Image (cartoon, helix red, strand yellow):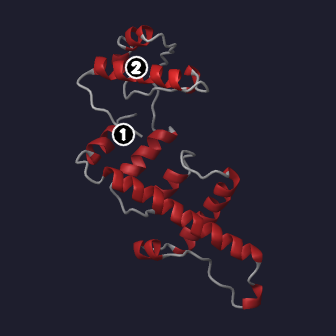
Amino acid sequence: MRFVVSGNQEQEVNFIARDIRCRLKNDPDLRAGDILVLAQRLGSYKEVIPHFFDRYQLPYYLDADVKMNDHPLSLLLENLFRPVREFDYDRLMKIFKSGLFQWDDQDDFLQALDYFENYLLAVAPNEEQWRQGPFKQPAPYDQDQISEDLIKTDRLLEKMRTYILTVLDDFKKTFHDLKIISRLYLHSMIFC
């Protein structure tokens, strides 16, 4: 994710169009139809977009204004910037169920997320437990009942815990020195 500050809409749209043209030129597998540009309020952009997209010979379609409350990207940004407890259950589920984060094996990720959600609801770990780990299911009373499934589930729980920590810590580190986090949060709320 990259943030760019521009002085006005013309500079903003010019930058976006130029960046899209460069990406299309440098990546032969990328098609213009693979790219989606979102704006808080499309109305004022409808006059600017055609000029710059035509200049860079980019096809475009200007859709009607649509509320973005339920768009996965909007939900992701809202919850990444939301000033709540870092490991708040609702926040984490909205971020990681957005479909915008996962590891290579999607089925493995979704299975791990299901186990993880159940674990969070059952155990409600605090921040210290999150940081110290590992996350494991409560052991059965009879140690003979420890099965391969239980061991596999514990591995998935720990893999998800470390993955979430990495994502959140990387995000926090990236934006640590920025003083505009609350402003970005407010702007992400204006998608609707």
Instruction: Provide the residue designation for mark 1.
Output: 188
How far across and how far down the image is residue 131, in percent?
Answer: 44, 72
How far across and how far down the image is residue 65, in percent?
Answer: 44, 23
Mark 2, Cα crowd under 10 Å, few <14 / some 14-19 / many 20+, is: some
Looking at the image, residue 146 sits to the left or right of residue 68; the answer is right
Q: Which mark is residue 18?
A: 2
The residue shown at (46%, 76%) is 132
Looking at the image, residue 126 sits to the left or right of residue 33; the answer is left
Q: Quadrant of residue 160?
A: bottom right
Quadrant in which the N terminus appears: top left
The residue shown at (37%, 25%) is 41
Q: Is residue 137 visible?
A: yes
* SS at mark 1 in the image: helix
The residue shown at (25%, 52%) is 177
Query: Relative to the observer, which residue lies in front, 51 or 95?
Result: 51
Label 1 and label 2: CA atoms lie apart by: 24 Å
* Residue type indicated by callout 2: Arg
* Residue type indicated by callout 1: Ser
185 above or below 172? above
Quadrant in which the C terminus appears: top left
68 above or below 26? below
Mark 1, Cα crowd under 10 Å, few <14 / some 14-19 / many 20+, is: many
The residue shown at (64%, 70%) is 155
Q: Work out whether mark 1 precedes mark 2 in sequence or the reverse, and give the earlier one.
A: 2
Query: Relative to the observer, which residue lies in front, 21 or 139?
Result: 21
How far across and how far down the image is residue 22, in percent?
Answer: 46, 22
Q: Can residue 118 be seen in this view?
A: no
